[in-house]
Image: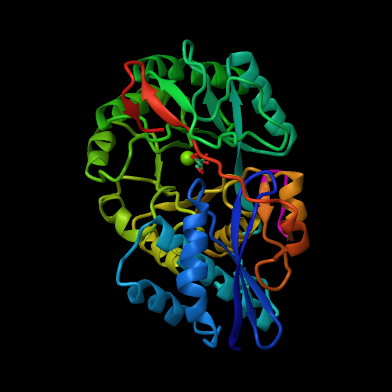
């Protein structure tokens, strides 16, 4: 099976997506997601200028060899752009191989280890009544595990909560042609958040699994304090409590709290987790297949994590396309150390461009039984949605200092 085409498709059905479409001499088509929110065109260029020309004529079955060829062959290692590009090639090749086998991809990864993939959804509110309604709404949609994000008195717009009610098609971070600016106050957040979880537990009882995303905003000692303050509310996980490229900082957090920790959505290789995994400083690995080198690399990462009883918690926001989402679901179903999967349903426009076989019902996702990944790209539909630059916000402290967003 020789590769005859490797096209990069940029489309924007409600938000921007970059997809690699690999075609072969036996007429098959495989897809890989290469979407890097806010830096999409850098990956599109990396692929079309530097990777696609190298793929033509290669044996599409040689997945590991192609991964190593692109990783080692670039000389310049890792980084989000490189690893998203490699991920797209890798996932497209797995898609092709599974289609040739006539099997859904998870069968090639060892087969199903479970019958369904436990998923969590996002609830958020500017204030408590809005938050409680949002949790009820997610429960009505079938979510059995819920991420809780709340507004903080005195702060206008913060991660996960906008000043205006959520737009139709799911909560999102807007589409700003320039990064918008938000104001952040760490102390106000630290004072407020435990009171929110107290109210949520009072309302919904002890059993509902609750998660929270700190979005990289705390120092290790602040994160330690928050983890400790949230212990009575028994979180499923506390996510990205610090900007964790300082892996050593997590030792301090861990010494002070038993709140489970999830980290890694901005990481793009197993190297970023070396200390975190080896010293058991986290409980869940958050990388997305799209950003961390594809299925080939993620399998190795999860196998390493499994030795330390660390589980998966694959990143699944709407800036991962349905192609990237499906790749994650096949892994989730197959690996033994699965933890939970994040799931933000895409908009109707996105689903019009990406037809998918995965399903969600009663708290569980399943990748479906279609041979391959089970996602196809409708190029005519994709062509209707032109790319528009869109950036994530930036954060400033009250005195104007840039802070982590
Ligand atoms: C999450 C994430 C996202 C990111 C987004 C950035 O846990 O889902 O934090 O909401 O902010 O992926 O592009
Ligand atoms: Mg997150």
Count of residue discs: 0
Q: Quadrant of the N terminus?
A: bottom right
169 sits to left or right of 310: right
Q: Residue at x 30, y 72 (%)?
A: 75
- Asked if one can make out residue 128 in the rendered structure from this viewpoint, the answer is yes
Q: Considering depth in this image, is 96 or 234 the residue closer to the camera?
A: 96
Residue 125 spot, x, y in % from top left = 60, 21
| Front residue (pair 13, 178) | 178
Quarter of the image for residue 302 reads: bottom left
Residue 358 position, x and y percent, is 71, 57
Q: Is residue 192 left or right of residue 282?
A: right
Q: Quadrant of residue 184?
A: top left
Residue at image position (39%, 46%) is: 283
Instruction: Residue at 72%, 39% (x, y): give it.
Output: 142
Which image quarter: residue 356?
bottom right
What are the residue bounds of the magenta stretch?
357-363
Residue 225 point in image, percent of width and height: 31, 24
Answer left or right for 321 relative to 405. right
Q: Position of residue 146 (x, y in %)?
A: 59, 34
Instruction: Identify the residue at horizontal 67%, vertical 52% (top origin).
Output: 365
Q: Residue furthest top?
A: 154
Q: Nearer the viewer, residue 230 or 344?
A: 344
Could you tell me which quadrant the C terminus lies in? top left
> Colour scheme in the image?
rainbow
Near-viewer residue (115 or 293) = 293
Q: Is residue 358 magenta?
A: yes
Whether 271 is drawn above or below 246: the answer is: below
6 falls in the magenta region? no
Q: Is residue 378 visible?
A: no
């Amino acid at each position: 099976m020789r590769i005859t085409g490797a096209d990069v498709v940029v489309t924007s059905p409600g938000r921007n997506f970059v997809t690699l479409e690999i075609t072969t001499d036996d007429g098959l088509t495989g897809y890989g997601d290469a979407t890097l929110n806010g830096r999409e065109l850098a990956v599109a260029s990396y692929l079309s200028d530097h990777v696609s020309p190298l793929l033509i004529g290669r044996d599409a079955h040689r997945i590991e060899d192609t991964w190593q060829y692109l990783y080692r062959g670039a000389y310049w290692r890792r980084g989000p752009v490189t690893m998203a590009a490699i991920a797209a090639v890798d996932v497209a090749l797995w898609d092709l191989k599974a289609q040739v086998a006539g099997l859904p991809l998870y069968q090639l990864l060892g087969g199903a280890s479970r019958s369904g993939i436990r998923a969590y959804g996002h609830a958020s509110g500017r204030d408590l009544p809005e938050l409680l309604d949002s949790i009820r709404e997610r429960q009505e949609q079938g979510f059995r595990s819920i991420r809780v994000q709340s507004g903080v008195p005195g702060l206008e717009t913060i991660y996960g909560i906008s000043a205006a009610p959520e737009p139709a098609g799911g909560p999102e971070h807007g589409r700003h042609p320039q990064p918008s600016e938000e104001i952040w106050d760490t102390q106000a957040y630290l004072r407020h958040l435990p009171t929110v979880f107290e109210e949520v537990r009072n309302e919904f009882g002890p059993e509902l699994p609750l998660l929270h995303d700190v979005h990289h905003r705390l120092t290790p000692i602040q994160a330690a304090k928050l983890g400790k303050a949230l212990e009575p509310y028994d979180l499923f996980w506390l996510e990205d409590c610090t900007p964790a490229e300082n892996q050593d900082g997590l030792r301090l957090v861990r010494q002070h709290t038993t709140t489970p920790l999830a980290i890694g959505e901005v990481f793009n290789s197993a190297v970023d987790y070396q200390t975190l995994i080896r010293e058991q400083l986290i409980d869940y690995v958050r990388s997305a297949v799209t950003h961390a080198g594809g299925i080939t690399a993620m399998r190795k990462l999860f196998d390493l994590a499994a030795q330390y009883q660390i589980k998966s918690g694959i990143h699944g926001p709407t800036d991962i396309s349905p192609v990237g989402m499906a790749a994650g679901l096949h892994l989730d179903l197959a690996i033994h150390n699965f933890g939970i999967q994040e799931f933000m349903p895409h908009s109707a426009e996105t689903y019009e461009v990406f037809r998918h076989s995965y399903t969600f019902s009663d708290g569980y996702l399943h990748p479906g039984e279609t041979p391959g990944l089970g996602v196809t790209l409708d190029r005519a539909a994709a062509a209707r949605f032109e790319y528009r630059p869109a950036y994530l916000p930036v954060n400033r402290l009250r005195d104007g200092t840039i802070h982590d967003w």
